Amino acid sequence: MKIEDLLSDDCIVLHLELTSKSQVIDKMLSIVADHPGVKDHDKLRQDVLKREKEMSTGIGKQIALPHAKTDAVSSPVLALATLGTEINFESIDNEPVQLVFLLATPEEMLAEHLKLLSRITRLAGREDVRIRLMAASSADEVLDLFREEEKDFPQI
């Protein structure tokens, strides 16, 4: 399973103008509301917020990765947003966030969930990839970037 296989153009939003962490999470959840893998949007929201309360998903390097293992989805769900304005996400490095991924996987897909978190972190953690994502002007450009960057990565 690759990022490019999970991410679709309707789950990519570029240059969002929001002002708070809660607005970002709400927007990310609204982006995936109609995703065919989402069975229960309210439960998904509860599970993502519960995970966020345990510890901020601001992972550093201007990236946030709200996520949940949940029975609210029947298959992995992934969304991506770039932010027009940096937002405080209580990140581990105390840096504001500009790039946000939302990942939700079914409860029984723990190994895949961890591998996807790792893959997203490894790719988006590279400065050259972050710069290209932030400069992207279309969802197709984002998908092409992941296609190119993942061509040498093994399948999960």
Image (tube, rainbow, N blue to C red):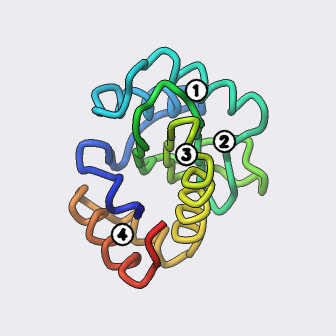
User: Which structural element holds mark 2?
Assistant: loop
Quarter of the rendering containing residue 87: top right
Q: Residue 102, which numbered label? A: none
Quarter of the rendering containing residue 141: bottom left
Q: CA distance from mark 4 to mark 3?
A: 22 Å
Mark 1 lies on residue: 22
Mark 1 or mark 3, whichever is nearer to me? 3
Q: CA distance from mark 4 to mark 1?
A: 27 Å
Q: CA distance from mark 1 to mark 3?
A: 27 Å
User: Which structural element holds mark 3?
Assistant: loop
The answer to which of marks 4 and 2 sits earlier in the sequence is: 2
Residue 75, compared with residue 99, is above or below; it is above
Q: Amino acid at mark 2?
A: Asn
Mark 3 surroundings: few (<14), some (14-19) or many (≥20) residues within 10 A: some
The answer to which of marks 1 and 3 sits earlier in the sequence is: 1
Mark 2 lies on residue: 88
The answer to which of marks 1 and 2 sits earlier in the sequence is: 1
Mark 1 or mark 2, whichever is nearer to me? 1
Q: Where residue 69 sits in the image (x, y, percent)?
A: 59, 36
Mark 3 lies on residue: 109
Q: Residue 146, which numbered label? A: 4
Q: Residue at x 68, y 25 (%)?
A: 50
* Tag 4–tag 3 contact (CB < 8 Å): no
Mark 4 or mark 3, whichever is nearer to me? 3
The answer to which of marks 4 and 1 sits earlier in the sequence is: 1
